[in-house]
Every structure is written in structure tokens, then in C-alpha cells.
Amino acid sequence: MIAILGISCYYHDASACLLVDGKIVAAAQEERFTRVKHDPSFPSNAIRYCIEAAGIQGVELDVVVFYEKPHEKFRRIISSFVDDRKRNPNTFSEAMSTWIPKKYRQRKLLAGEMTKLLGGGASEWEDRIRFSRHHLSHAASAFYASPYRTAAVLTMDGVGEWESTTIYHGVGNKLTQLAHQDFPHSIGLLYSAFTHYCGFRVNSGEYKLMGLAPYGKPTMTSLIWDNLVEKSADGGFSLNLDYFDFRTGNLPTNRQFWDLFGRLPREPEGELEAFHMDVAASIQEVTEQLALDLARVAQKLTGEVNLCLAGGVALNCVANARLRREAGFDSVWIQPAAGDAGGALGAALAYWHLARGGERNADGVRDTMSGAYLGPYFDQTEIVHRLTESGAVFRILDDDELLMETVKALDQGVAVGWFQGRMEFGPRALGNRSILADPRLASTQRDLNLKTKFRESFRPFAPAVLAEFAQDWFDFPDASPYMLFTAPIDPAHRLAVSSREEGISGLDRLAVPRSVVPAVTHVDYSARLQTVHADTNPLFHELITRFAEVTGVPILVNTSFNVRGEPIVASPEDAYRCFMGTGIEVLVIGNCILHKSEQNGPSINYAEEFTLD
């Protein structure tokens, strides 16, 4: 047995993943255990979980692989500050005070943490620690977990050590880098700069910018192309750094950027105006074009018909859909934990295949992510014990009764917390740690956003649709199990919009139903699609099947089981607290069902429990 632990930490979205003889056994983000959104700390809890899930002891770990090379990253940071240290002495000093005593000597730091967590000698752990490269970890997480024997691999994010974009060619168990683009020229940093400019938080608000874009018009794309971004003949690009300050850790944008757009940055929680919507639409259009150009380069360099994607930019499902349509590939597969959390997985896979020569058995059809259901599981006995200790009032039903009562609640317009099986790895809830609702109700989107999630009303929700009926409802020919592509709703299910309604602008467009499933139809008739498959999640598939038998609609609203600023719930206790503090009326955990009206415990002012994202 060869046990390889991959870890990602110290920036954001710390995580751990465990391979046993090349098989992905377990993976989880640290935030789910600590309840700190995007927790960057050493993933002690995630590591402990992975080891327990594998049924091994810590001493049986053969190798621990960190997802990037700290010394290379340190050299990049030093280089970035050299020209600016006189202008920004405080920022330079702060960066050095963090790196020199802590991150620069990372082998010793990691060995010390492993010793505290699992015992043994620090020198023994030092001997077992290896380092991947940031973008190699991303590429490995995409290609080696994909169903493809060969593929082009494109990674795009903010920045790793130096690289911000890479193109690899994956063949069998080999990955060869063919091209790269380096910091500070970065699609991820460009998009994050606009995220901050529109008043959202970097590394968490990019989803909001993408969701806001359809409310605006791309009236500023020429302004961006003429002043901020220059495309090169080889498919790459460069940023005009006069408009950005992210090189030295200041605000992403500067006075020159603000003057160009004629506005100061929007204050967080400030009013969203048509201007911000147009900015969002414009940078989304530019981002899509840049990604499309790079994907075409990858196709030209490799000659492949399959494309794999990873890196934070690969979580932009609107851009992903455009790549699938226009980049010239027959098939596109995206790592569901495409951001830095997935770096832990990629680091372990890279070591197994490249350093140890582990072979792959890709069949061209199935990936090796097990539906991304790689996190903790609670059996029925433990669920009953934990709910009882929490003071919950519940009934225990058999599977058939449970499904019937859940469908009844959904059909009555009730929001249902759904907690089943193993927790998902990555940022999406895929039917095991989800809040579910009826997609037919026009009020669902606003009510879930404002009363349950405590977040902005404009944010769209995903349809979880039975895979066998997906093409009857959406213009999308492939599977989309990880909610990483948008798709237009089929015209047969759209509603006519009157000329008066067509004239409505801004967020008021939310009030105009666009289809017979308005809760999952965005203002541009798109939806962030999840196809649900009986082989990877039979219980969730059966629930939607039962809902379809009652309603004629094989779709449920699926959103993550959390509120704004909170990590997705990981334990029954997390789920019960969220249930008691939000507008969720029914909670289903394992075979236990809870109704809000029957609970004795006090409700919680849950909206104030977490820092806004």
C-alpha cells in the first residue's frame, strides 16, 4: 500500500486529500470543520478526517505533498516588491515579516505541524515531504481525475509561484507543459480587480460578479481592450500595469483605473447601479474572450479533441459554456474543486503519476471523482445521537416515507435542508449538503436569497435535473454533474415576455418570470446546470424522480446548505443550527426529518453569525 497525502494551505481554501495506491479515498476543505470561510490555516481537521476515512494510521503515510513551491513563490514576491518598496515600505515590511519566519522555511513548518497532529519525529516528516508546483497541481487535478486518456489541459487563476496560466498536454500518465503566462499578467487577477471595484470581496465575490453580469450590457469592453488588456498574436495577453496595484499587495486597482471608469470603487453593501452591472457584463465578456483564445491555442498546440480545465477561473461556468461551444473541442471536463482546494488533490496525483510512475485506467467515460462526494459521512446511529444532543425534535422514517414527506413539503413551496451521505469536495453543493426548493415558484429565488441565505437578491440558483431528462429542458448535449456549465433553457419551457416587461431594467428584471421554472432561470434564460445521475447519487436522483411524478417537473432548486459568509454545513450539528436560524422549514438528515414548527429550541439570529462575504 502506498498512501499519499496532498495538502493545500496558507493562502486560502486549505484542504487535504488522500490517495491510496493511486485511488482518491477522501478529500475535504478545512473551512468545513473550523467554520471559517476560506480558512487558509494548516488543514489539521481535514487531514485527520482523510486518515480516518482511509482506515489507516498517520505513520502509514508514505509521502506528504504540498501543492506549490514556497521558495519560488517567495522569489516572485521579493521581485514584485523590489521596484516599489520605497513607495510602499509598510507593505513590504508586513510581507517579509510573514514570509521570512513562517512560510519561507515551509518544510520545517509542515513537518512541525504533522508532528503535532500525528506524532513521530519532525525529521522523519521532513524526509517525507515533497513539493509540487502550483499550476502543475491544478493541471494534475484536472487531467488525472478526468475520464480522458489524452487531453489538452488549460489552467487559469490569479497566480501560483510565477505562472498565472499554463497549457499542458496530458497523455496516459504523463503531463508536459507546452506554454505558460507569468505574473502579473493574469486573467484571474484581472477579474478579481473588477470584483473588488464592484464592491465584492476578492476570492469569494467573483461568483457575484458573474451573476450580476446578465443584468447589464457590455458597454465598456472597448474601454477595457483599449486601455487595460492587450492581446498578443500567439493567443496570450498582457495587462497595462499602470492601472493596477496588486503587485505589491495594495488595492487591486488605483486612481488611474478609477479615473478611466469615472467612478470610485463601490463600497461593500453599497447600492448596485446600472453602471456596476455594465462593468460586470463588460469584464465577463473580456474574460470569456481571453479564455477562448487560450483554449484555441491549447487545441492548436496539442491537436486534442478533449480539454481539461482547472484553476480558479475554471469556476466561471459562463465562460466554461462558451469554451465548450466555441473552442473546437469535442468534450470539456472541469475539476469540480478547480480552485486552490483542488491543489491538494492535484499535488497528490502529480506525485503518484509523475514521481512514482502510477498508471491510469481512464476509460474515456467516467472520471475518478466519485461525484465529488469525498467528504465526511455520518451513519444513522450517529445522526440520531448528534441530533438528540442538540435538543432537536425529529421523527425517523423509512426511505419511502422520507421521500414522500420531503416531496410533499417541496410541492407546498417549503425550503428543505437536505443532508445525506458524504460531503462534497469543492465549492458546490451537489445534493448531499443542499437546500432544496420548488423551481416552479417565481418567489423562490428572492425568498431563498433574502430569507434563507441572507444574501443579495440577484444571485441565481442552480437546477438539479435528472440526467435522463436534461436535454428535454436545457440546450446542453453533455452531462454536467458538477454545476460548472451554464445552459440555455429550452424554448419550449420559456414564457413570453411582454413589451412592457422587456423595458424593465436592472434588478427589477428579477420580477419577470422567464420560464415555467423561474427559480432557476436567470434573466438571460440561462441556468447553472447540474445533471443528477442515479449511479453517483441514487437517493437524490430518486427524490427528484418522486418530485417529477407529482409535479411533472424533473428539476429541483439546489443551493448550498449555508448562509452568506458561512462554509457549507459539514455535520448534523451545523445543519441543525442553520435550520434553526434561517427560513428553512424542513430538515432531512439521514432518515430523520425535522419540522421547524415542532422544535423547542430558541431560534438564532443567524444572519449575524458570520462575516459577510
Image (cartoon, helix red, strand yellow):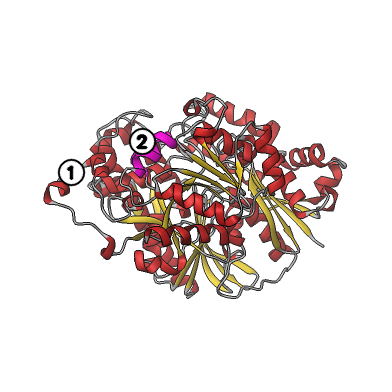
Determine the residue positioned at 27% across, 33% down: 259
- Which marked residue is nearer to the observer: mark 1 or mark 2? 1
The reply to whether residue 180 is in sight is: no
Q: Residue at x 25, y 38 (%)?
A: 275
* Element type where label 2 sits in the image: helix
Q: Which residue is mark 1?
A: 504
Q: Secondary structure at mark 1?
A: loop
Q: Nearer the viewer, residue 600 or 98?
A: 600
Q: Any mark on residue 279, and which?
A: none
Residue under the point 51% across and 47% down:
434
In what quadrant of the picture does the N terminus appear? bottom right
Q: Residue at x 58, y 26 (%)?
A: 93
| Whole-percent x, y for residue 64 in the image | 75, 51
Q: Residue 20 appears at what percent x and percent y?
A: 75, 60
Tell me the magenta residue range.
444-459
Q: Nearer the viewer, residue 586 or 94?
A: 586
In the rendering, at what x and y percent does residue 553 appear? 38, 60
Q: Amino acid at mark 1?
A: Ile
Q: Residues within 10 Å of mark 2 (few under 14, many from 20)?
A: many
Q: CA distance from mark 1 to mark 2?
A: 25 Å
Position of 367 relative to 204 (above/below): below
How crowded pointer 1 is (Cα within 10 Å; few <14, some 14-19, many 20+) is rated as few
Residue 117 is a magenta residue: no
Residue 266: image quadrant is top left
Earlier in the chain: of badge 1 and badge 2, it is 2
Q: Which residue is disc 2 drawn over?
A: 197
Label pair 1/2, CB-CB below 8 angstroms: no
